[in-house]
Amino acid sequence: MRDFVEKGSIVRRIWADPDLILLVFAGSAAEFALNRAVDWLFFTGKIPDDPIGRFFSTVAYAQKIVFAEENEAQVIIRRINAIHAGVERAREQTIPDWAYRDVLYMLVDYSRRAFELLHRPLTGGEKTELYATFRRLGEMMHIPGLPTEYAEWQTDRRRHLERDLEHTVYTKDLYNRYRQHLGEWRYRLLLDVQALVVPHRVRRLLNLSAENPLSYLIWSYSIVNGLGLQTLARRALLPPEQREAVERLNRNQIA
């Protein structure tokens, strides 16, 4: 059976690495707190009650699709569509198409930003492959209006960032939940990580400073990586209840 994403793909390399997935999580947690559709997260109460766990669950779903065979990926996507449809029925409203695109665009953009922050710039071909993979996922989820090419997506991404983000009471509430679940020093570390990975508009709306001590430590990542110290670093940075969940995201052996 054909894999949803071919072995050796840059997409599999990114989504096999827990360090990169943590950066995708951090960036998405920042941006979605600003999204005009963030009220949908509060409707069921699941994300506000357990924001860290629910966001990890979301990225775990994305990873399962990346490493699934084609037919298995279709089953997972149908399950996601059914969950969304159930929430829409309960609220008697429809999640806007632009909100679905926003979430898909986060996965594309933060995949690139995470890899480039810790490793190197993606090539043009790798960017094209990254977007094409998530565009196919979006089409299987029946998300309309997706740009055809990477360059068109970049333009639409900028448009979405300008139009769909605002600082609201939901933003403040969600960040208070982050602080409660992470504890003070881990919360401060999350803010520093977010400042390094998010686009300028997100950073400005959240008043995050990219000039923080963490920016001077990024250069040492290759040393930490070479010495195999990532697991120790994750243990220090993550709440105990999330450590095993993150370690299960490690798929470097099959990328």
Image (cartoon, rainbow, N blue to C red):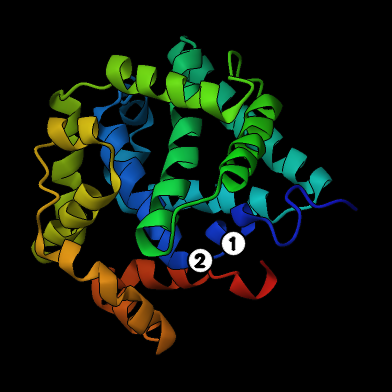
What x and y, as percent, mark residue 69?
A: 79, 52
Give the spatial CA distance, label 1 vs label 2: 7 Å
Q: Secondary structure at mark 1?
A: helix
Residue occupying the point 44% across, 20% down: 155
Q: Amino acid at mark 1?
A: Arg
- Asked if residue 106 can be seen in this view, the reply is yes
Q: Secondary structure at mark 2?
A: loop
Pointer 1 residue: 13
For residue 32, which quarter of the picture? top left
Q: Tell me: 120 left or right of 65.
A: left
Tally of numbered discs: 2
Q: In which quadrant will I find the C terminus? A: bottom right
Residue occupying the point 26% across, 33% down: 33
Q: Tell me: 7 left or right of 183.
A: right
Q: Tell me: 233 left or right of 195.
A: right
What x and y, as percent, mark residue 90?
A: 48, 18
Residue occupying the point 34% across, 82% down: 224
Q: Amino acid at mark 2?
A: Asp
Q: Residue furthest bottom?
A: 227
Q: Nearer the viewer, residue 198 or 168?
A: 198
Residue occupying the point 39% across, 48% down: 113
The answer to whether the residues at label 1 and label 2 have Cβ atoms under 8 Å apart is: yes
Q: Is residue 15 above or below residue 243?
A: above
Q: Residue furthest top?
A: 93
Mark seen at residue 17: 2
For residue 233, which quarter of the picture? bottom left
